[in-house]
Image (tube, coloured by chain):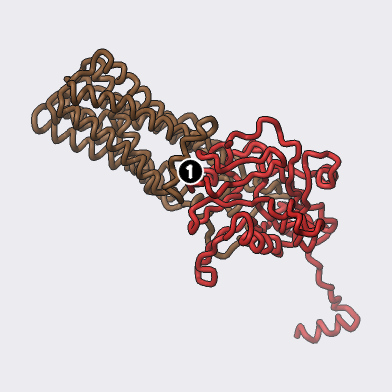
Chain colours: A brown, B red
Amino acid sequence: MHPAYSIIFFTTASGLGYGLLTIASVFLLLGLIPAERWYGVTVMVLGGGLVAAGLLSSTFHLGHPERAWRAVSQWRSSWLSREGVMAILTYIPVGLVALGWVIFETGSGLWGIAALFSALGSVVTVYCTGMIYASIRAIPRWYSPWVPINYLALALATGAVWFDMVSRLFDVASVFSAGLAAVSLILAWGCKSAYWRSIDTAVPVATAESATGLGALGTVRVLEQPHTSSNYLQKEMGFKVARKHAQKLRKLTRLLVFMVPFVLVLVTLGTDGTLARIAAVLASLSVAVGVVVERWLFFAEAQHAVTLYYGNSSV
Amino acid sequence: MTSPPATPPAKKLGLVIDLDTCVGCHACAVHCKEWNTGGYHAPLTDLDAYGAEPDGVWFNRIHSYDVDTGNGGPSQTVNFPRSCLHCDDAPCVTVCPTGASYKRTEDGIVLVDEDMCIGCKLCSWACAYGAREFDVDVGVMKKCTLCVDRIYNETLDEEDRLPACVSTCPVSARHFGDLADPESDVSKLVAARGGYDLMPEMECAPTNKYLPPREKRDRFSAAPIELETASPEGGFLGWLDRVLSD
């Protein structure tokens, strides 16, 4: 699949933003962080801003962005619509959490209920994002429960690393925030490895023979393409660049998303002061760049069934 | 609206495509383009039409395959027109977030309402058969309408109320009719010739059926013809062979 930059930015930025909002809401609810004003402003602006920037970016790849509001109408059948609905609904508790934290400097009582819904809404929205891809049977490697699991795990991991970073800059980081970052990185690493293993060992779902129904006659090979230059289908579904470098990009993902941030998070646990802050900032940068590589690969590695008509032998 | 019809459509209009008779002339694709660039989805944009990299929206793509029969004999050429199959369980309809993509209850035709389409392209990802092509110029998704603006068009003569691709095919490789009615000509044709679904593993329940190429009578007798042996002992050819061999 062609990796559109707007969608890569959208899924990674909103994943990070929702991860951050989820963790901040839970920590606030449990009283693990102080409901201090400027800390609250930073967390909520960063989390809410990343989500907003992601959603805005997702409209850039639309043919008619001005009609985007229509996309909330078909939540009964469409995961894309459900995601839009959940994203909008989640802004209500997120806004209330921000109000309580920033204006009244509290996260308990009724504000705690808002925090609970802000965390739940964020998780459900990320799940919907994952299901947009996991509901597409025509892309067999995406049609897998590992896809929403990975979207959730990576949102949690990137959000946790950034939450620890912001908390550290405000001197409110704890063994809980750093510990959660470390654990969620390992969890996400496990989920991503499981996804890669599942797609590497997957049995082809469809073949050029089943796509044409000519398998009874023999092996199907393209004699002549139907058109002389690439059409929309080939440009959108037939992307090959990253598949060629998949192993290198996987190594890069392992390094930037998991190994480097994990080591740096351990550094923050073992040190304090400036060194810990620098380690936390570097971990955040690494995980953010890494998850973009991961998402790019997620798209580029996926093979669409329509490629079977254009010379691919199986998907 | 993007949920499929609750009850299966009473009529299932669709195509039956005969891979035995198709000669790969692309006339169906051309007539389709001609009609539809002035029809429901007008215009079917072409970019750089006379340049080095022409690009545009077409509802029919005519592939040609070389099938290796695997027995050392000659391979078989199969021309393969590909267009929307108007599936019963059309995933392109259910993924649509706006309701622009829908399946008609009265005849099962899958259509896009261009005024509702936001151009998110998700429906084209959901279609395993590549039936939908995005119009980058207009910013909306376009697809085969089964010539909904011809088949019910009372300003046309009755015999012309057929999809453009069917009406133009010079070898009658494309047939149009109601596939829900077991007594229709198309249903009988499917039954008689073993018509099949493309990629049933995608579980889309396509309406359109394909008829397989018939068994070639001379496939196994088509071994290379041996050259005549010129006996050196006698005859004119033997003499000629001796003279030319020196």
| Protein chain holding label 1 | A
Quarter in which the N terminus of chain B is drawn: top right
Q: Callout 1, which amino acid?
A: Ala
Rate crowding at label 1 as few (under 14), some (14 to 19) or many (20 or more) other CA atoms within 10 Å: many
For the residue pair B16 and B201, the one nearer the viewer reads as B16
For the residue pair B145 and A9, the one nearer the viewer reads as B145
Considering every residue shown, the one lying at the far left of the view is A273
Would you say residue A39 is visible in this rendering? Answer: yes
Name the residue at 39% across, 43% down.
A58
Callout 1: SS: loop
Query: Hey, which quadrant is residue B87 in on the image?
Result: top right
Name the residue at 65% across, 50% down.
B145
Would you say residue A238 is visible in this rendering? Answer: no
Q: Position of residue B116 (x, y in %)?
A: 52, 45
Placement of A197 over or under B164, stated as above or below: above
State left or right for residue B75 relative to residue A269.
right
Residue to which mark 1 is pinned: A302
Q: Position of residue B66 (x, y in %)?
A: 68, 57
Placement of A43 over or under A245, stated as above or below: above
Considering every residue shown, the one lying at the far front of the view is B155
Query: Hey, which quadrant is residue A68 in on the image?
Result: top left
Query: Hey, which quadrant is residue B81 in on the image?
Result: bottom right
